[in-house]
Image: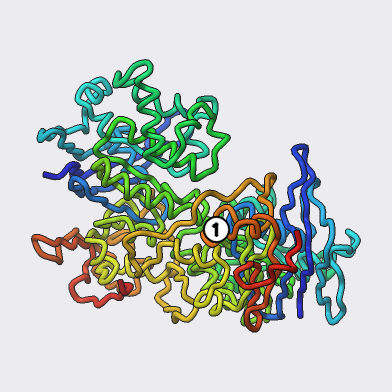
Amino acid sequence: MALLEVRNLKKYFPIIKRGFTRKIVGYLKAVDDVSFHIEEGETLGLVGESGCGKTTTAKLIMRGIDPTDGQILLTLNNQTIDITKLKEKELRRTGVRRAIQMIFQDPYSSLNPRMTVRDIIAEPLIVNNVAKGKEIDDIVADLLKAVGLRPEYMQRYPHAFSGGQRQRIAIARAIALKPKLVICDEPTSALDVSVQAQIINLLKDLQKDFQLTYLFISHDLGVIEHICDRVAVMYVGKIVELASTEELFSSPKHPYTEALLSAVPKPDPKRKRKKVQLTGEVPDPSNPPQGCHFHPRCPYAKDVCKKSYPPLVNLGNQNHPHLVACHRAHELELEGVNV
Amino acid sequence: MLLSVKDLRTYFFTDEGTVKAVDGVDFEIEKGTTLGVVGESGCGKSVTARSIMRLLPKTGRIVSGEILFNLNGQTVDIAKLPKEEMRKIRGRHIAMIFQEPMAAFSPVHTVGDQITEAMMFHFGISKEEAMQKAIETLRRVGIPKPEQMINAYPFEYSGGMRQRAMIAMAISCNPDLLIADEPTTALDVTIQAQVLELLRELQRDYNMAIMMITHNMGVIAEMADHVVVMYLGKILESAPVEELFYNPKHPYTMLLLRSIPVVGKRVERLEVIKGDVPDPRNMPKGCRFHPRCPYLMRDLCDQKEPPTVEVSKDHKVSCFLYGGERDGAS
């Protein structure tokens, strides 16, 4: 049973014409018919360039914003509930709020500078009536130890900590309620390179110790490959490819995935640069191209690509699905990176 | 040699004390080559660039050292140049591009006005002539319909196009040295690849030297001929690019290269550098990396600053592991 299943999720933001009538002139399809599932204990990666809908997907699952259409199914204690339409009160009563937590990109803005570290980490415990009084201090101390910080620092304020330490505090807060699913939205992008590895290793350790399931959002393919079991690639609001990490990196089936992999600068000066360069930029999601959204940039595009959007089909097998949305996926021989 | 920086020290005098942002830095850039400068936040890489451009904020000052620049065969020391003389070099012989193009452009002037301003100032040409040249430059950097885009404002450009427009502005006077401070950090990977490719082409066509500042080892590997690794205001290691990647000597460089998750090379567990980058206002004594270094030698690394040792041709490293115990300055 999958812990989380997302079915045909859509989020259309209305584009409103300024002025007296405030007429809706169109829709920005930030997330457009996205489906995937996450098994308990695994890490699903979500990659894509800015504006592709990664963060909107995260916010929808968090129920921070309401979806336009689709279903978000969460399985807790062998019971599957559709959380898509639950009201705030019900989200709390059913334990959904406690089960899904989030870690943000920038630990400089995700921690309240006027609260002590103890209060920051204790807040979810108090709000959810998990602990009281002295008990709270013990739990906070344990959490700080779990993320590699000294409990003595509890009474300090966030400004006394470095970026990496702040991200550890944010992680402690996220795991305070023993969540099932943790959504990590670019958790290492704002950190110094020498600190990123510490946080990645910490997230891996915590996953084992606390039986966590991750939805890991990043634009850094190196980090994604390192931490994820399966990866979904998004482009202009849609998933264009979804497969196991090894499969996706070694034999991509969507030209966009191939282009992304080849565009990453590799830290190896002798490596021959390949010329699979994408021309143009990510299209405006409020006015995406007809047909396959990628066709204006795609080196393999044919007439059919301009006419209809390709369905997401399974080119793998039942046990090892490899989903791809490309008209020519079955005939193309694309190049990955050797793992 | 186009540029040689000798024992450069740039300090910031703030209310909370002196910050030695750049503290004794030496490097050289040959004509037409690319020097990669790697380092994390607070290592002084941007301050080094701004010292060369003489664009330091009010609290910052070059306290000692030389920045020798080859100006048409004549050597000038930029560190001591009067403001008026510097204006003739800045934008003309040395130009700079930044991480955030929106911050480099004025939002209230058209892109064309901003590109032509420098050309009119340095070459004394008319607005019409400058406009013609600006259109050509925009076309050269790959802006579609440059005749129209030249009259557009920066906000009307997309992210990647704005970066190209900033590059056009920087190369408009055909500089000898282009300082690129994290030019692709804010860009998506597919656009990053395009911008790096453009910079390589321009370097080839104009025989322009590039000082490429970044924290991304991949970008360094693709772009640089020679690399310097900075940490808290010092250069820890300096080597030709292949030497640095295949034969790193300084513990910081070695660990940094091993701690980055690399596409195509999955490992079970990443190696880490313990601790955090210290606050530059509170610099560690001795070698600046010693609190985080796994090879720390007590009573040596935490007391004395290691001297710079040349381990092989053009490969210099500042670390006691490679000798220099007695002559280390305290």
Image location of residue A37, percent across then percent down: 19, 48
Q: Position of residue B324 (x, y in %)?
A: 69, 71
Image height of B55 relative to A247, above or below: above
**Front-most of residues A106 and B146:** A106
Taking A68 as reference, is B74 above or below it?
below
Q: Specify the farthest residue to the top.
A: A133
Q: Identify which residue, A290 or A97, lies in the foreground.
A: A97
Residue corresponding to mark 1: B293
| Frontmost residue, A293 versus B223 | B223
Query: Where is residue A268 drawn, in percent x and y?
Result: 46, 75
Question: Helix, strand or loop at disc 1?
Answer: loop
- Report the label total: 1
Pick the quarter of the image with the C terminus of chain A. bottom left
Q: Which residue is drawn at 69% across and 68% down?
A: B325
Q: Give the chain of mark 1.
A: B
Q: Residue at x 39, y 71 (%)?
A: A262
Q: Is residue A322 at least partly visible in the picture?
A: yes
Q: Which residue is drawn at 24% across and 57% down?
A: A230
Could you tell me residue B14's position as x and y percent?
77, 41
Can residue B222 be seen here? The reply is: no
For the residue marked with disc 1, what is the amino acid?
Answer: Cys
